[in-house]
Amino acid sequence: MTVLEKNSTPGGRARQLQAEGFHFDMGPSWYWMPDVFERFFAEFDKKPRDFYDLVRLDPSYRVFFEGKNIMDLPAGVDAVQSCFENIEPGSSPKLQQFLAAAQFKYEFGMREFVHRPGHSPLEFFDLRVFKAVFRLQLFRSISREVRSLFKDSRLVRLLEFPVLFLGSTPEKTPALYSLMNYADMVLGTWYPMGGMAKIVDAMFELALEMGVKFEFGCKVEKIQVENGRVTKLLALGGREFAAAAVVAAADYHHVEQELLEKQHRQYSERYWRSRVMAPSCLLFFLGVKGRLKNLRHHNLFFDSDFRQHAREIYESPVWPSDPLFYVCAPSVTDTSVAPSGCENLFVLIPIASDLADSEAVREKYYQLVMGRLEDLTGQNIRDQVVFKQSFGGSDFKSEYHAFRGNAYGLANTLLQTAFLKPKMKNKKVKNLFFAGQLSVPGPGVPPALISGQIVAKEVLKILHD
């Protein structure tokens, strides 16, 4: 097996940027759903701890609300219930009820949905699925579900926040996705010491051990098809690679529309343009001289209008007027990711896909969020920044060929779920498969791992034919 990688290092969107003694995770920063990682490594008789040291964060994260009101979400269900009860008396049993329903959705979904390849709706014609439809709450919004149980706006926003990245407003997102609250509050928020890049290092090491070859700086320019099968991949510089089967983990749209000839494509450009995309984002990687106060490892800034920002992402796509944002400070947990006495900051602003992001626009939003960050944490930060690099929608396009500069793939709407996502197997080319966030089961590190596991089984089927 050979992996052809456009960039100079493994990991794709989960790369790491190293500069001036700082180590920045450039993509994922949340380690949720540890059971998925356990199952992945178990396929090779390994465990995550064979490769990296995993620690549970406590508190899981800090939330800044308006009026400099701060809330730390503790680790452990009992502690979370106490936290809710302190904010809204009587809410603890309601949270218990909410999480019990979320647990059912999570466990049922992991067992019955996410490991199916999604070739056909017939995969889901199952009595167990039909019986579970109402408990899965596919036709009730998560906003309605949350607001029927909780009144305090802080608790509502806390429970709605995970869906901000799913591709719609909480009012239009099925209550099915409360399963993410179960992943958050019950399974916990974790961190691999050394950064999320340690997961990439582990997979790279494991692949090498299994005999996989890697070709870095190898940009594929064409997929050659003969008699309904891929025969060859043509890469930059005139390099050629024969293929018995191909798994395209690059951006699905890019592979289909730019690497395949038109007669071999499953989808038209019109189809892709009709897809509802999850957000893009504007990122800042900041190296700060000196240690900072009032920050946890993960920090959510909900001091502005949640609904307004969501509308500016999904309903009327524009640069946000007063954005929510997220700050990761991994050096709070792990001093190895920054020089001694320094802080490592990863700042993320969710934005609509396909917005023009000039340097002037980036600088405007840097100053905007940094001003709020300084005000809410009570300290000067900008004057202490010794390293700064931004990464926006145009970079997602140039670095990853990301369709419309998306950061999180397709929106998780009902009409873009399971067998309604772009197909994992090309129906016109027998040995061409797709994996990653634009196919089954969807965006995020755990789903990406599951996607690879599903497609591996599908590839083995045709190789053994």
Image: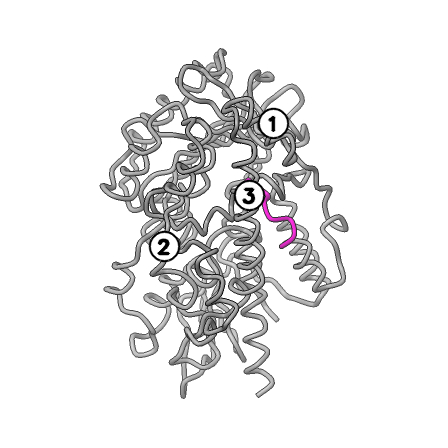
Q: Does dot 2 land on a helix, a strand or a loop? A: loop
At label 3, which amino acid type do we have?
A: Leu
Q: Does the magenta run of residues contain 311?
A: no
* Neighbours of disc 2 within 10 Å: few (<14), some (14-19), many (20+): some
Q: Does dot 3 land on a helix, a strand or a loop? A: helix
Of pointers 2 and 1, the one earlier in the residue sequence: 1
* Neighbours of disc 1 within 10 Å: few (<14), some (14-19), many (20+): some
- Residue 288 in the image: x percent, y percent? 54, 21
Residue at the image point whose x is 56% and y is 61% from the top = 450
Residue at the image point whose x is 65% and y is 56% from the top = 204
In the image, residue 429 sits, relative to residue 418, either above or below, namely below
Q: Does the magenta run of residues contain 32?
A: yes
Judge from the rendering whether residue 9 lies leftward or rightward of residue 406; answer left or right: right
In the image, residue 245 sits, relative to residue 295, either above or below, namely below
Q: Which residue is mark 2?
A: 139
2 and 1 marks in contact (CB < 8 Å): no
Label 2 – label 1 distance at C-alpha = 31 Å
Of pointers 3 and 2, the one earlier in the residue sequence: 3
Picture quarter containing residue 403?
bottom left
Label 3 – label 2 distance at C-alpha = 18 Å
Q: Which mark is residue 82?
A: 1
* Neighbours of disc 3 within 10 Å: few (<14), some (14-19), many (20+): many
Tell me where the magenta segment starts and ends, as one range.
29-36
At label 2, which amino acid type do we have?
A: Phe
Label 3 – label 1 distance at C-alpha = 14 Å
Judge from the rendering whether residue 262 lies leftward or rightward of residue 28; answer left or right: left
Q: Which residue is mark 3?
A: 99
